[in-house]
Amino acid sequence: MKGCAVAKNYKVIIVQPRYQINLGYIARVSKNFGIGRLFLVNPRTQIGKRAIMFSKHARDLLDNAVICKDISSAISDCDIVVGTTGILHKGAQASGRAYSADEAVIRLSKLRGSKTIGILIGRDDTGLTKDELGRCGMVVHIPTNPDYPVLNISHALGILLYLLNSNGFKPLPKEFHARRAPRKETEHLFSLFDSLTENKRIRNKKTVRRVFRRLIFTSQPSEQEIHALITALK
């Protein structure tokens, strides 16, 4: 698998993992595709002998896993969060739209530069909640047999990382690089939008704000485009 490595700016975040075997498999497949660190949100199991056994040569990922108290702290440095769900209608209800893995990967492969992208997976038994999926900039569903649609979280992660790798992360020529807006400027845009909606008669302001954020995250506007939006909202 020479040359097989997902972009360095990806991080894998597992929400409340319950089974050590899954932790082992997640570490193993993450290392297969060049993921350098795992983040565990309120794990319901320890990183014990069984996890280590199934991780094979990826024990270092388990040894150095970062334990987070909540999702907010785990995704605090992420510019976009990709949530996964095996239940299509739950993903669609949470985000307004769920992407197939192929479509999501094509969009993600266009992101360049130092953007940090979080892949949010879990739980082993119940998956992510609608509220948790609603916090994601993109929700991904891997189409499977409708009679048995839900994949094991380690299998779903492996498929997604493989697709990301197969689409490649070859850098664009410098002349085609648009300067990405600094994160604080994007947050400033969101703050302006929130202030604007606060004074409007909108039934569900939370949904409107979430949809606006998702549009910004998935379109990845340049610094110039963010400045134009900020000017318009001011």
Image (cartoon, grey):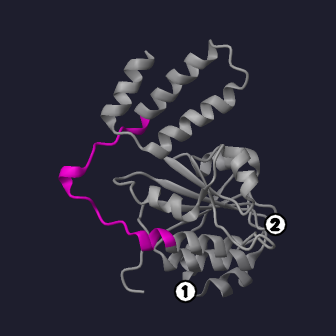
Of circles 1 and 2, which is in front?
A: 2
**Foreground pick, 146 / 183:** 146
What's drawn in magenta, residue-wise?
A: 163-184
Quadrant position of the C terminus in the picture: top left
Q: Amino acid under label 2?
A: Asp
Count up the numbered dots. 2
Quadrant in the rendering for residue 84: bottom right
Residue name at image x 50 percent, y 80 percent: 32
Magenta residue check for 165: yes
The numbered mark at residue 100 is none
| Residue where numbered disc 1 is placed | 57
**Foreground pick, 14 / 205:** 205
Question: Measured along the vertical axis of the image, is residue 4 above or below residue 193?
Answer: below
Other residues around mark 1 within 10 Å, as few (<14) / some (14–19) / many (≥20): some
**Tag 1's secondary structure?**
helix
Question: Measured along the vertical axis of the image, is residue 30 above or below residue 192?
Answer: below
Q: Is residue 78 visible?
A: no
On the image, the x and y values in percent for residue 213 come to: 54, 36
Other residues around mark 2 within 10 Å, as few (<14) / some (14–19) / many (≥20): few
Q: Is residue 8 visible?
A: yes
Decide if residue 133 is on the left or right side of residue 119. right
On the image, the x and y values in percent for residue 208 come to: 63, 29
Query: Marks 1 and 2, Cα distance to the nearest angstrom?
Result: 26 Å
On the image, the x and y values in percent for residue 89 come to: 75, 53
Residue name at image x 41 percent, y 23 percent: 230
Q: Amino acid under label 1?
A: His
Residue name at image x 75 percent, y 69 percent: 150
| Residue where numbered disc 2 is placed | 125
Magenta residue check for 90: no
Q: Earlier in the sequence, mark 1 or mark 2?
A: 1
**Foreground pick, 120 / 148:** 148
Residue name at image x 41 percent, y 51 percent: 115
